[in-house]
Amino acid sequence: MANSPLTPGVVPGRLQPDDYTRNFADKAPPLTAHEAAVAADRCYFCHDAPCVTACPTAIDIPLFIREIATGAPAAAARTIFEQNILGGMCARVCPTEQLCEEACVRMTAEARPVEIGRLQRFATDTLMTREGHPFMRAAPTGRRIAVVGAGPAGLACAHRLAMKGHEVQLFDARPKAGGLNEYGIAAYKTVNDYAQAEVAWLMGIGGIAVTNGKALGRDMTLDDLRAGHDAVFLAIGLGGVNALRAEGEEKAQVVDAVDFIARLRQAEDLSTIPVGRHVVVIGGGMTAVDAAVQSKLLGAESVTMVYRRGRAAMGASEEEQHLASSKGVRIVTGAAPLRLLGDGAVEAVEFAYTRETETGLELTDETFRIRADQVFKAIGQKLEGAPEGIALSGRKIAVTGPGRTSMSGVWAGGDCATGGDDLTVTAVAEGRDAAEDIHATLMAEG
Ligand SMILES: Cc1cc2nc3c(=O)[nH]c(=O)nc-3n(C[C@H](O)[C@H](O)[C@H](O)COP(=O)(O)OP(=O)(O)OC[C@H]3O[C@@H](n4cnc5c(N)ncnc54)[C@H](O)[C@@H]3O)c2cc1C
Ligand code: SF4
């Protein structure tokens, strides 16, 4: 008999083929030209617009919306791409409800912002479906720069450097470029292989040679790169996952949420991805929501997300929490895992309620159990494989200003470096700004 949401254990194919198509369809389908015109019409084109200040890449939002309103979406896209070359992906994945749209004056006045994210997607999709790349390279400078990591930070840096006329060598440990755009972002936010299409489009600038399957620390050292290049930009993201530090964590079917999501993102056929009947996700951030929602969409009967603090402290925005609830995910707050129970494979998780005190979070004596045949750990990622000799601050590569590390000629940005907030758009801003600084430094050297 075929599997269903009620089949015990962790199994693939819990749903009918059509269910997968429906469940993983585009979360926010593109606006039509008419809808975009109506949405653009709501903008006041504010002077000193608060939405621009709230955008980490400082896109001139009123200008691009005006360009849409006047029937020039390709010009609007250029305005966006000048600041954010991954503006197409950011239009799909940015938590706009916490950034530009939260700051929009229409939000303050009417609790309904201008749909900046969807308008950005309308403009960028319009330009990207046309032939050719919108930017030209400057005359060759004869300088070679190595960029390590082809996620949003590395791609943005590589593009800006190539545009300035430098030769860029972009290395990534994984088989495909894109970083978490390709391996992490929820499938329903970026459908139709958009991450790869965007990488191919970005490469249209020329001057960027990509080498996949090559890892810093395994296949090359930082000294090698420094010797062969005029500058190095490190954008290696956060490859490690924090441990739960709960008893029984090593049991079968206790898995890293990021690995599960990567597997799901790379699957040609979603019905081949095994998922538990009862899933528990531990964590309160975007990764936790994505693992929980996608488990439910794969046909898990029950999915519970458990976070140790209150809802307001969750990394996932209110909108993401709402999305999870709307898909049938139960969110339990104020509880932390004590032990994972089961004979070989996990069968349940025991939690203790927590209490906020002046000295921090404490576990109470009150405990409860949740049935689970699959547990996803989503309590944060950590830096892995930082090159020797480079100074760290906390658990990230220490940087000052636009990504300068403790080592001369080496810059860093994106999730692996201090200062950001672990969002795609911030990684793009940091990659771009580091590229500008690398360029200024190399040109000043003459
Ligand atoms: C599951 C998940 C969902 C997310 N959803 C969202 C979202 O919806 N919206 C949002 O704004 N943000 C989201 N984020 C955060 C966002 O994806 C990251 O902030 C962003 O990708 C960081 O970009 P980056 O370039 O710094 O790193 P990454 O995207 O992690 O890219 C780093 C790259 O470096 C490569 N690399 C690592 N080590 C080496 C090495 N030693 N040698 C060579 N290459 C190496 C990796 O293979 C990878 O390609 C999500 C994160 C996760 C984990
Ligand atoms: S704050 Fe809102 S209304 Fe004002 S420019 Fe930005 S999008 Fe338009």
Image: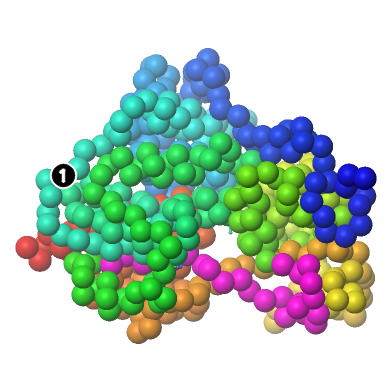
* Residue 210 at x, y percent in the picture: 34, 55
Up the image or down, 249 lies above or below 429; here it is below
Q: Which residues are magenta?
A: 232-255
* Residue 229 at x, y percent in the picture: 21, 67
Residue drawn at x 56%, y 36% as measured from the top left: 192
Q: How dense is the environment of label 1, judged by Cα within 10 Å: few (below 14), some, or many (20 and up)?
A: few
The answer to whether residue 252 is magenta is yes
| Dominant SS in magenta | loop
Residue 287 located left or right of residue 277: left
| Towards the viewer: 418 or 180 | 180
Residue drawn at x 64%, y 62% as measured from the top left: 259
Q: Residue furthest bottom?
A: 389
Residue drawn at x 63%, y 34% as measured from the top left: 26
Up the image or down, 343 lies above or below 85; here it is below
| Towards the viewer: 19 or 303 | 19
Residue 292 located left or right of residue 410: right
| Towards the viewer: 362 or 327 | 327
Up the image or down, 395 lies above or below 433; here it is below
Respond yes or no on whether mark 1 lies under 8 Å from ligand 1: no
> The N terminus lies in which quarter of the figure?
top right
Which residue, given by chain and number where applicable, does mark 1 sit on? 138
Residue 314 located left or right of residue 303: left
